[in-house]
Image (tube, rainbow, N blue to C red):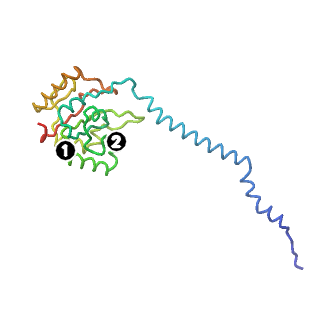
Amino acid sequence: MQHRQIYRLADLKAVGTTPRSNWSSPTLRTLTAAIVALAHTALALLFYRDIAGFSRQQPRGVDLDSPYGAVVQATTEPQDVIWAAPNEPLVYLQADRRPASTYAYYQPWLADSPSIAEALLRDLKTHRPPVIVFISDKHIPWFFSLPEPRDYAAAVYALLQSDYTPPTQPIPCCATSFSVMTWHQRCARACRTERPHAPVHPYGHTPLAAVLAHHPTTHT
């Protein structure tokens, strides 16, 4: 004898929806919302620590005058382009000179890109700025140790050493000058009208460690 069982449609619906009802329970929804809220809070705190916290560490009340601005202006022409690195925007502003490259500054994360490094070298070789300010050992403040500019920008540093003349004689206001006599005279004349002493860098670094380079083929 064949036995048949007849299920009501309501019973079948109940069987099919039982597992789903467990996932949509109020307790599970509350737990999921709490986890999502906790994750968002953690991300917000991390952002605050990395961005706002970094901003609070920056020096306050620092003289915004660059020790190189007047000197660069006195030794270049208005139509000249210059380059200042790793991040010296005041040199461009005070000297009223345009940057020789799209990359007006050069931080480690830019040097990590081969395309950016190649573009910068191409710009410097093409435009041949008569003056380059490159602070080779500048400390870049961050939450972890960063390499010095002469290390992460080794290709640029090599270009300066091969194609440019580094300073050899200190001048009171700009701390460095060229070995070329005409440059020495122009630098000294600019310093007499600006300031008697070189300021201390806001991160404890003095301009004496900078490389202020002059291309030997121009402005001699």
Q: Within the image, what quadrant is residue 151 found in?
A: top left
Q: Is residue 93 left or right of residue 169?
A: right
Q: From mark 2 to mark 1, how far is it between C-alphas? A: 23 Å
Q: Quadrant of the C terminus?
A: top left
Q: Amino acid at mark 1?
A: Arg
Tell me the residue at 74%/50% (across/down). 25
Question: In the rendering, which numbered label is found on residue 108?
Answer: 2
Tell me the residue at 44%/31% (across/down). 55
Q: How many labels were placed on the picture?
A: 2
Name the residue tied to disc 1. Answer: 128
Residue 3 screen position, x and y as percent: 88, 76
Depth check: give the residue in front, 152 or 61: 61
Q: Quadrant of the N terminus?
A: bottom right
Residue 181 screen position, x and y as percent: 9, 30
Q: Amino acid at mark 2?
A: Pro
Residue 132 screen position, x and y as percent: 22, 38
Q: Within the image, what quadrant is residue 82 found in?
A: top left
In the image, residue 185 sits, relative to residue 165, either above or below, namely: above
Tell me the residue at 27%/47% (across/down). 120
Q: Is residue 154 left or right of residue 180?
A: right
In the image, residue 39 sits, relative to residue 190, either above or below, namely: below
Question: Which of the two discs, 2 and 1, labels the residue nearer the N terminus?
Answer: 2
In the image, residue 172 sits, relative to residue 31, either above or below, namely: above
Depth check: give the residue in front, 140 or 62: 62
Tell me the residue at 12%/27% (across/down). 185
**Element at badge 1?**
loop
Q: Is residue 153 left or right of residue 47?
A: left
**Element at badge 2?**
helix
Q: Are marks 2 and 1 in contact (CB under 8 Å)?
A: no
Q: Is residue 206 left or right of residue 220?
A: right
